Amino acid sequence: MSAALDLITRVRGVRGAMLVSADDGIVVAEQLMEGIKGGAVAALAASLAGRLRRAMEAAGTGTSVFWHLQAEQGALLVVPDGNSSVAGGGGILVVAVAEPDVNIGLVRLELLRVAETVV
Amino acid sequence: MADDIRALSAQLAQDPQSLVFLRLGEALRRKGQLDAALRVAMNGLERHPHLADAHDLYARILTDKRDYERAFDEWDMAVRIAPNHTGALKGLAFLYFKVGDLAQAESHLEAARQVEPDDPSIDQAIAMMRGGVSPPAPEPSVDSPTVASPTVGALDEARVFAGLEGANEGLLLIDGAGRVLGGALRDRAGADVTDAVAAYLAGVSQEAARTAKLLGLGAWNGLSAEGQQGNVHLGHPTPEALLLVVRERGMPLGRLAILAHRATAMARRWLERGT
């Protein structure tokens, strides 16, 4: 799992990467720069992912395959694996924390690649 | 009707910036007070020159006054501002029929039908036109808050996104408690899912803010999500309110973010006007 996270953290501008249990928001694996509170971020990311999944299903767009929270000084990028699309499905969220000038497209590709390997 | 006009006039006097002029102008037009209606519409247009509905109202009044040339210009402007404005499309169809350009008339009615496939008046107009009978001059829809809602004031929810690309679909503005402030959503089957989506999104704004703060990322600006059948973008016009923009998967996330940015700015202005 550490090798999988390496794929993400080697992208320039990524400050950390995590695998998070989608159901309970617990960290499964992490590679984070100092100062990032992995446990709390994992819990909030899982909660946001759950709300977003339900809202998107209701809106008819299907479950999310990638989402991206943009902020003034950085971004949180998340790819839910296939099992995360079902409540209680025991899925994993692949999460990256990045600087504001990161190449979003590149991080997205690596997140998707990791999501495939951890299923 | 006279009471309505008095009440609407009072509302407009109290808040000259409000969109109540649309209902007042239409009420005056229906009562046959065309000069008064024209004044109301022109004053409204001066304050809201980019509002397609204002041009549509003005065009309807001009049509009643048989000033077809200027009516054409106004409906043409309305369609330039909001290409899916069915009132303006029907108005242009009516005027094209008047000058004998049946192909253009039918083309505009077809365009209106694509936007509102369930509107029977469009099918009737096409049938009448094909039968050689002039389609009726366009009237605002009976469901339109412009004429039907008794509570429409400055916060006229149907007008929040007027003039925005795709303003009639896939835009939802809610408050922090998940209550709908404007817009509406339908799923792929056409079912109204506004309330369900609003309920699920309640609290997302605060949660996103907490997450960004915890990560030391500062204030959050937006959240883009790519779905299996569509893409969405969430913005927050105010710290509490949340704006959801939903589009087909074919619209790239970057373009969706630009559209959402515009919609968020419009929603912010609209919310500020109402407070």
Image: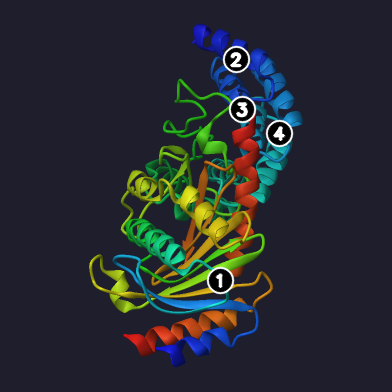
Residue B205 locus on image (x, y percent) = 49, 49
Q: Which mark is residue B19?
A: 3
**Number of the front mark, 4 or 1:** 1
What amino acid is labelled 3 in the image? Leu
Ranked by sequence position, the earlier of labels 4 and 1 is 4
Q: Secondary structure at mark 1?
A: loop
Front in this rendered view, residue A107 or B42? A107
Q: Is residue B175 above or below residue B205?
A: above
Sequence-first tag of 4 and 3 = 3
Kind of residue sitting beneath label 2: Gln
Q: Amino acid at mark 4?
A: His
Which of marks 4 and 2 precedes in the sequence?
Answer: 2
- Answer with left or right where residue A20 lies relative to residue B243: left
- CB atoms of marks 4 and 1 within 8 Å: no
Query: The disc numbered 1 marks a residue on which chain?
Result: B
Q: Whole-Å distance between the Cαs marked 3 and 2?
A: 10 Å
Badges 4 and 3: C-beta atoms under 8 Å apart? yes
Q: Could you say whether the residue bearing mark 3 is in a helix, strand or loop?
A: loop
Q: Secondary structure at mark 4?
A: loop
Q: In this rendering, which labeled residue sits more in front, label 3 or label 1?
A: 1
Name the residue that disc number 4 marks.
B48
- Label drawn at residue B252: 1
Are there few (<14), some (14-19), or many (20+) residues within 10 Å of tag 2?
some
Q: Residue at x 71, y 34 (%)?
A: B48
Q: Are marks 3 and 1 on the same chain?
A: yes
How far is mark 4 from mark 3, CA to CA?
9 Å
Label 2: which residue? B11
Sequence-wise first label, 3 or 1: 3
Letter of the chain that mark 4 sits on in the rendering: B
